[in-house]
Amino acid sequence: MGVLDKDYHIGLNTPQDVESPKHMMPIKVAIGCYNYLFGEGIKRLLQDEREIDVIGIFNEGADFKEIIKIEPDVALVDFYIFRDLPEDFASQTQVKILIIGNRTFYAVSDKRMADLVSKGVAGILPPGADSYLLKKATKAIYSGELWLDRKTMRNILSYESFSKREIKLTEAEKEIVSLICQGYRNKEIAQKLNISEQTVKSHCNRIYKKVGVSDRLQLAIYVYKLWPDWSHTRVGIEK
């Protein structure tokens, strides 16, 4: 499910540091901040990163459609800007959303945090994050990962509820669940088990259906909460 970073950060589904291939085009980033000067400050923090290209800065009053119109890969937005985004934003675009926490971060309820993730937010950076983590989180969510700090993850764990029922998984499915909870991606699982990536995807779909979840995050949360025989270290969160 993830690895601890700097003692308190979790990058879900990232067993190793995220590194962009050398041949990859720069990640196109749009920044949305209530205060335009803060947006410029974030841009300066990212300027020395060759793998990231800031293509636009938006401030208060910016419409979500304006942001996605310039076709960024990742949008870095603060809570002031994010609260104006439509509820169905994830269905309107493939842009990955990374929320940059400010002083209102700690006032956001656990339910709201869980809703944000379930509706498509790819990452949330707490106010204490530095430029190193900003860059790392941007690369991680661009690569399809979910980026949450430990406290946020625990809040989501406490909020999410599942009904416990008897679930019968094959040995192959159990092995895949174990690898998913350790943070391995489909391609890595395929290599580890010497099977095709398509076979892994088929297994995952059957597992999701049996467990009654829709994605890797929910599966890992289910395992953490309802299968106590699975160790805490396997999901990357300490007791």
Image (tube, helix red, strand yellow):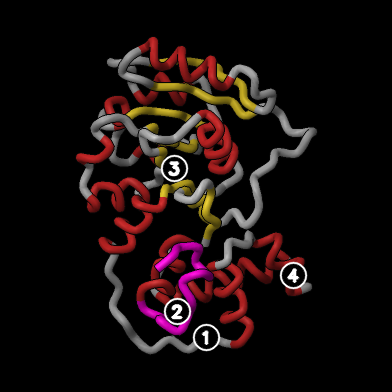
Q: Mark 4 and 1 residues: CB-CB less than 8 Å, in contact? A: no
Secondary structure beneath dot 2 equals: helix
Q: Nearer the viewer, residue 48 or 159?
A: 48
Q: Earlier in the sequence, mark 2 or mark 4?
A: 4
The answer for how far apart the CA atoms under marks 4 and 1 are is 19 Å
Near mark 4 (Cα within 10 A), the count class, few <14, some 14-19 or many ≥20, is few
Question: In the visual, does 123 lie left or right of 152?
Answer: right
Q: Write down the region rendered in magenta.
A: 226-239
Confirm or deny contact between disc 3 and disc 2 (CB under 8 A): no
Residue 221 drawn at (x, y percent)? 40, 67
The residue carrying mark 3 is: 123
Q: What is the number of callouts on the image?
A: 4
Q: Amino acid at mark 2?
A: Lys
The image shows residue 1, relative to residue 98, as above or below, that is below
Residue receiving disc 4: 192
**Nearer the camera: disc 3 or disc 2:** 3
Where in the figure is residue 192, as x and y percent of width and height?
A: 74, 70
Residue marked by disc 1: 169
Tell me the kind of residue under disc 1. Answer: Leu
N-terminal of the pair, mark 3 or mark 1, is: 3
